[in-house]
Image (tube, rainbow, N blue to C red):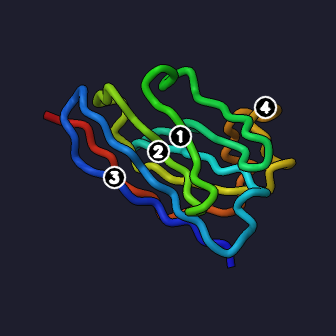
Amino acid sequence: QEQLVESGGDLVQPGGSLRLSCTTSGFAFDKYTIGWFRQAPGKAREGVACISNADGNSHVADSVKGRFAISRDNAKNTVYLQMNSLNSDDTAVYYCAAEIWVRANPRDYGCNAALYPYWGQGTQVTVSS
């Protein structure tokens, strides 16, 4: 059974950094695209960054480009989201999600939440002084 578990969310001051982890199990990690998404209260879910473990293609949303980076560790079946220069607009629940890479290749689809059937429970990131 496909499982995704997020970790690393925390309360951080503006300008600070966090690294989120998405650890997966129950599917062939190297054949999937893993995406990071976030949802703030009263707002729609937003694609933040995603990476295809099959061919390495990745996409980062314009809203976080230059501050956030996505990476993977195939040996650990884990995808990371490094977040720097955090501000209050980054406060949200962050989710990771997975789909077979050909159906959600970032090169073709960006990070479209509607394409992902497998989701974690989310981790809270709060940016506040």
Query: Of the numbered discs in the image, which one, if any, rests on residue 44?
Result: 1
What's the residue type where badge 2 is placed?
A: Gln
Q: How many marks?
A: 4
Q: Earlier in the sequence, mark 1 or mark 3?
A: 3
Residues marked 1 and 2 touching at CB (< 8 Å): yes
| Disc 1 from disc 2: Cα separation | 6 Å
Q: Closer to the camera: disc 2 or disc 4?
A: 4
Residue drawn at x 38%, y 45% is 19
Of 35 and 55, nearer the camera is: 55
- Is 39 situated above or below 64? below
Q: Nearer the viewer, mark 1 or mark 3?
A: 3
Which element carries disc 2, helix, strand or loop?
Answer: strand
Q: Amino acid at mark 3?
A: Gly
Look at mark 3 in the image and give the residue it sits on.
Answer: 9
Mark 4 belongs to which amino acid? Arg
Instruction: Kindly identify which numbered label has been placed on residue 39.
Output: 2
At horizontal 50% and vertical 33% (from top left) the residue drawn is 69
What residue did someone put label 4 on?
107
